[in-house]
Image (cartoon, rainbow, N blue to C red):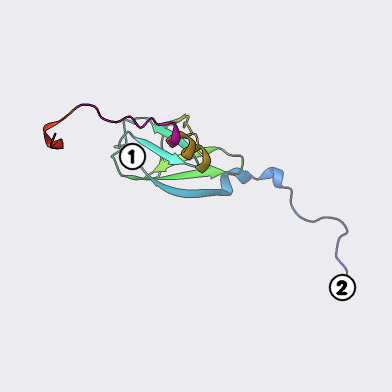
Amino acid sequence: MEPALEGDSHPSIEDYALNALFYTQENRVITNDFTVRYKLKIFQLERLKNLIIRLKDFVTICEQLDGKITILMRNNQLIFKGIEMRMRKKISPIDHVLQENKVSHNKITTTYPFMGV
């Protein structure tokens, strides 16, 4: 069989908003300070007049293809701001042993009643 028309017959994707169609959704729990964590980022939720936000409520985090993040709760879009998360410095096992050896092991010179002296 031969095609009816030569060339590409697919429609152009420029007419479609693909970011609105394709996105990932994940559920998160609101913590005590009204923050939500997602992919090593912390988002501080703002208060809304028409929506009551309670601790330990679930929110849905939607990440679009272009990286834009929206947070939804009961089909309402929440206002939020990103907070920088400080990473803790990881200590290798060798450094950990070296730090333990630096601790001085001074003997206690003070006598206490429970020591029996």
Report the residue marked by disc 1.
31
Magenta portion: prevailing SS class: loop
Foreground pick, 27 / 93:
93
Report the residue marked by disc 2.
1
Q: Where is residue 35 shown, x and y percent of the image?
A: 37, 35
Of all residues, the one furthest to the front in this rendering is 117
The crowding category of the residue bearing disc 2, from other C-alpha atoms within 10 Å (few below 14, some 14 to 19, many at least 20), is: few
Foreground pick, 86 / 49:
86
Mark 1 / mark 2, whichever is N-terminal:
2
> Is residue 104 shown left or right of residue 13?
left
Residue drawn at x 49%, y 36% as measured from the top left? 98
Instruction: Check the image and report above or below for 4 versus 14.
Output: below
The residue type indicated by label 1 comes to Thr
Q: Which residues are magenta?
A: 101-110
Residue drawn at x 58%, y 39% as measured from the top left? 67
What quarter of the picture does the C terminus occupy? top left
Instruction: Check the image and report above or below for 7 versus 31.
Output: below
Residue 107 colored magenta?
Answer: yes
The residue type indicated by label 2 comes to Met
